């Protein structure tokens, strides 16, 4: 290899390494560049009991999503329509499964239904709440964590859609890294649950009493 070509190859390699180093820290990785796993959390205090109980059992179901936000990889965005994955940060469990777990826990604490369980627990229900995670992203351009969820309440025996609604929330990111994103997304999730549960209780409570089984 000629000296000029060798020098060019060396310069190109150094630039590539520097670029890789820039991408591997800060936004694209965990704060300390060490591989880490995180979990979403419900930050609300213990909820009070509902004013009335719907005399039906409820099953909460995590539905498959086409978005990359509902994967074990954590997602961030530097521009609209653009998505990228953190290199050294991931979810300890699939976000939709974690959201359903926290949702079922909050519903159960409210005692608004005869019973509540997650699908796969071996417990059947007369009502089914399908939950789909449409978006879960660290929006770096707006410095916020954004969550969008679609909920569908279904009467299982008749296979009738009772109600459907999309919920969205965002929370500011204090630190532009994976930990800061998780904290913001947990706040956004708490806001979504704060809206979703009253909607669920009102939708189920509006069903005709004769339809109760």
Image (cartoon, helix red, strand yellow):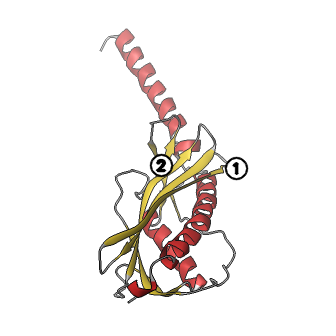
Q: What element carries label 1?
A: loop
Residue appearing at x 51%, y 45% in the figure: 76
Q: Is residue 111 left or right of residue 65?
A: right
Residue 145, x across and y down, in percent: 59, 50
Label 2 packing within 10 angstroms: few (<14), some (14-19), many (20+) = many
Check residue 45 in the rendering and tell me which mark sits there, or answer none: none
Residue 100, x across and y down, in percent: 46, 71
Work out whether mark 2 precedes mark 1 in sequence or the reverse, and give the earlier one.
Answer: 2
**Residue 146 drawn above or below residue 140:** below
The reply to whether residue 152 is in sight is no
Check residue 174 in the rendering and tell me which mark sits there, or answer none: 1
Dots 2, 1 in contact, CB < 8 A: no
Q: How many marks?
A: 2
The reply to whether residue 144 is in sight is yes
Check residue 75 in the rendering and tell me which mark sits there, or answer none: 2
**Residue 171 drawn above or below residue 82:** below
Residue 3, x across and y down, in percent: 37, 11
Label 1 packing within 10 angstroms: few (<14), some (14-19), many (20+) = few
Q: Is mark 2 on a helix, strand or loop?
A: strand
Q: Quadrant of the C terminus?
A: bottom left
Q: Quadrant of the N terminus?
A: top left
The CA span between labels 2 and 1 is 17 Å
Residue 83, x across and y down, in percent: 45, 41
Q: Which of 126 and 171 is in front in this view?
A: 126
Give the image quarter of residue 62. Answer: bottom left
Q: Nearer the viewer, residue 152 or 137?
A: 152
**Residue 188 drawn above or below residue 55:** above
């Amino acid at each position: 290899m000629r000296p000029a070509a060798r020098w060019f190859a060396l310069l190109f390699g150094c630039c590539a390494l520097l670029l890789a180093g820039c991408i591997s820290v800060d936004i694209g990785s965990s704060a300390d560049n060490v591989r880490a796993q995180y979990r979403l959390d419900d930050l609300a205090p213990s909820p009070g009991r509902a004013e009335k109980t719907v005399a039906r059992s409820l099953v909460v179901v995590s539905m498959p999503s086409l978005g990359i936000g509902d994967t074990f990889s954590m997602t961030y965005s530097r521009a609209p329509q653009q998505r990228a994955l953190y290199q050294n940060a991931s979810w300890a469990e699939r976000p939709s499964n974690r959201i359903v777990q926290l949702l079922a826990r909050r519903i159960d604490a409210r005692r608004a239904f005869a019973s509540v369980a997650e699908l796969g627990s071996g417990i059947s229900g007369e009502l089914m709440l399908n939950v789909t995670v449409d978006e879960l992203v660290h929006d770096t351009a707006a410095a916020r964590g954004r969550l969008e969820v679609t909920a569908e309440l279904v009467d299982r025996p008749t296979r009738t859609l009772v109600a459907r609604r999309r919920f969205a929330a965002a929370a500011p990111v204090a630190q532009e890294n994976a930990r800061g994103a998780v904290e913001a997304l947990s706040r956004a999730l708490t806001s979504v649950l704060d809206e979703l549960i009253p909607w669920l209780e009102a939708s189920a409570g509006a069903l005709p009493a004769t339809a109760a089984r």
